Image: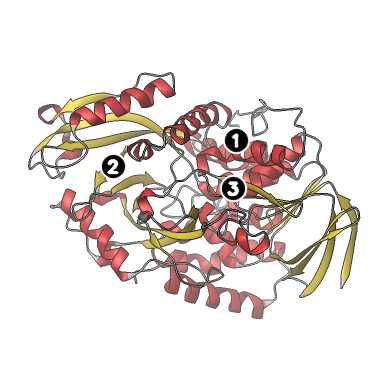
Amino acid sequence: MEKNNINWDLIVIGGGVTGAGILREAERNGIKTLLLEQKDFAWGTSSRSSKMVHGGIRYMKEGMFGLTYESVKERQKLLKEAPFLIKTLGFLMPIYKDKSPSKLSMSIGLAIYDLMGLKWGHKFIKKEKMNKVFENLNSEKLKGVFYFEDAKTDDARLVIRLIMEAVQGDSKALNYHRVNSVKKTENGFSVTAFDEGNKSEIVFKGKNVINATGVWSDKISRLPFNNKHIRPLRGSHIVFPRKFIPIDDAIGFSHPHDGRMLFIVPWQNTIICGTTDVDHSNDLNDEPSITKEEFDYLLECVNHYFPTVKLTDNDIISTYAGVRPVVSSGNLSPSQESREFILWKEDGITSVTGGKLTTFRKIAMDTLKKAGFKLKLRNQPVFNKLENTKNIYNIENSIWEKLLGRYGNDAHKVVKDKAPPLLDSIPGTDYLWAELPYTVENEKIHHLSDLLLRRVRVGNILQEGGLVHLDMIESLCSEYLPWDSDRWRNEKDQYIKFWRKYYSIP
């Protein structure tokens, strides 16, 4: 068993958006931090969201006004601090005579929502004045639509950028390091992790430990609350081509079967529809995937509100599912459970679970305070300021802005001194071929699925997960990965099997 001789100020367990946010805030406050993730960064829920950075207007229906207010505040900050990564998203809410929400309740809710964000931005558009974008929308008993604004992002890139900017200092992040034990010592903690790459155990020393492992959190530190437990809830999505519903704004609907709120979101030249909210009883270490019942449930909603589209199984590009960590007493339906984050300290270990993608910064700062750290820098932008945003490369401005969002100041390194075909887009996407070798060289790729499902989202937005491009990807990336031809063949075979099992139609 190998021992790491660095005595870290803090060891964070968990590499989702919560752990990444804690790492980022700790580093900027001079806390020498090590992050350990059992699989890939953002492998869990943090790469499987509906891609929205939103206040969660639907949470007000459940009385979660505090959560909505904090989310709206954070959304506004992120829109200012992370241009190109966090982008304004128009949102439409059709109002029907016989369905919830009513025009009055929605009007009141949106007024509160806008006041929280200190920006009056909603309006009601009568049915007679709706444009051709809605020609396929079910018009039976339709009164009109409300328009308001939220925001969207690439959730996995948000996590990766947080981590990559944090480790530019004295901190470090390791994926594929599964923590097997945490033991108290005279000077802090001894954390034993299994390194998948070297197939060996390593012992890390740290003065403090934060457990940010989401649905696994009570495996490391038991919940100190009576009659409460971690309730894993699965949220699944379907992805289909934008041509079926060519919209630029997201749309919210109540499902015709049970009245739950669902969203249709334009993202990466596709449309995402989700999310479900059901109990997840499968092994948490296995890749979650959509069930046939969830798939049919989402397809039913799309076809109910867009009856002329007639979406079928054959039209679906991909599916994906994530598992939310919710602290529950077991008395509520999944959709009624609180999305508030929970903090506790047990045997010196500070644990955090729950919360939303949007509020990762507040969660990080509250967790660090709970762990006993005094934060000197509290109101600084969460990402490094972009120093040079000028596009001096032979690429479209829209693509350049996306690179700035994904990589921050390192966007220049992605395309500098590159020439076609590296500066060409991967067909059907707004990713450049140049992004593949850059991420492989710089962003801790262990498997092909890391590259195609989280760094560059080809696996989510192309048919068969981008199968037709695998040989080209090998030719571009082979010099940056220590894989021989057998390893490449195995990685491609495993990726195809993996994608078809977990990301295709059930």
Residue 200, compared with residue 327, is above or below; it is below
The image quadrant of residue 126 is top left
**From where the camera sits, is residue 246 visible?**
no
Q: Is residue 227 left or right of residue 416?
A: left
Residue that mark 3 sits on: 17
Residue 316, compared with residue 132, is above or below; it is below
The image quadrant of residue 203 is bottom right
Kind of residue indicated by mark 1 = Lys
Q: Is residue 294 left or right of residue 307?
A: right
Residue that mark 2 sits on: 252
Q: Which mark is residue 362?
A: 1
* Circle 2 or circle 1, nearest the eye: 1
Residue at mark 3 to residue at mark 1: CA–CA distance: 12 Å
Of the pair 139 and 244, the residue shown nearer to us? 139
Kind of residue indicated by mark 2 = Gly
Q: Residue furthest bottom?
A: 486
Label located before the other in sequence (3 or 2):
3
Residue at 56% across / 65% down in the picture? Answer: 449
- Position of residue 279 measured from the top left corner of the image (x, y, whole percent): 40, 63
Q: Is residue 149 left or right of residue 129?
A: right
* Circle 3 or circle 1, nearest the eye: 1
